[in-house]
Image (cartoon, rainbow, N blue to C red):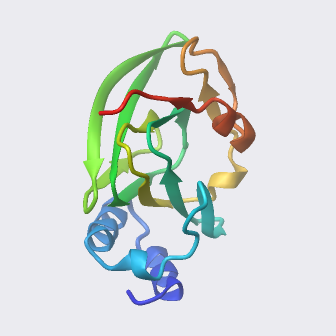
Amino acid sequence: MPNLTDLIHAARRATTPAALLRLQQDIAVSDVLTWLPGAGAAEHVLHAEPTLTLLRVEIPPRTEYPPHDHLIPACIAVLDGRETNTFYRLSGGALSPAGETDTTAGSVQPMDEHVIHSVANHTTTPSTALHLYLGDLFHLSRTIWHPTTHAAAPYSDDLYFSLARTTAPA
């Protein structure tokens, strides 16, 4: 996949979570970082349409973002660095941790539409990932949870970035 147009066309053909996972597995081990736009931005929208959203996401060193949902299937290919996802379950309105995974460069983390997670980069170097979503991430009524109180609020990028916190190095 030598350019963004080819990536968008390939992602449009990946209409199921399984197909999205296969595509991201190929992307994760490719040279996509040599041409992918948006370097240096925390979140760069590569493409958005009703059935597909593509983001380049860079997480600064020692940064953790709050729990949030997507409401649509997602697949994250870590292209550089390492990300730690903490997964949560919601029961009776209470949010509680349900597991954690580390995803390193060349690896992929699929997520179904029911996932609630927080993501962190506990290392001393930035991480970069390509996020593919099967839907328009920007036109959903999503939820974000405060990282310590777990109080729920309507999702907004402003709130998401304001609730980021510094973590201890790995």
Q: Does 38 appear above or below 74?
A: below
Task: Judge by depth and name the residue closer to the eye, 56 or 131.
Answer: 56
Task: Judge by depth and name the residue closer to the eye, 29 or 73.
Answer: 29
Q: Does 63 appear above or below 42?
A: above
* Relative image position of residue 42 (x, y in whole percent): 59, 54
- Residue at 44% from the left image edge and 28% from the top image edge: 167
* Relative image position of residue 22 (x, y in whole percent): 28, 68
Q: Is residue 84 visible?
A: yes
Q: Does 67 appear above or below 121?
A: above
Q: Is residue 115 visible?
A: no
* Relative image position of residue 55 (x, y in whole percent): 55, 62
Q: Is residue 155 left or right of residue 58?
A: right
The number of numbered discs placed on residues in the rendered structure image is 0
* Relative image position of residue 105 (x, y in whole percent): 28, 59
- Residue at 63% from the left image edge and 15% from the top image edge: 151
Quarter of the rendering containing residue 88: top left
Which image quarter is the N terminus in? bottom left
Q: Does 55 appear above or below 168?
A: below
Quarter of the rendering containing residue 89: top left
- Residue at 29% from the left image edge and 33% from the top image edge: 170
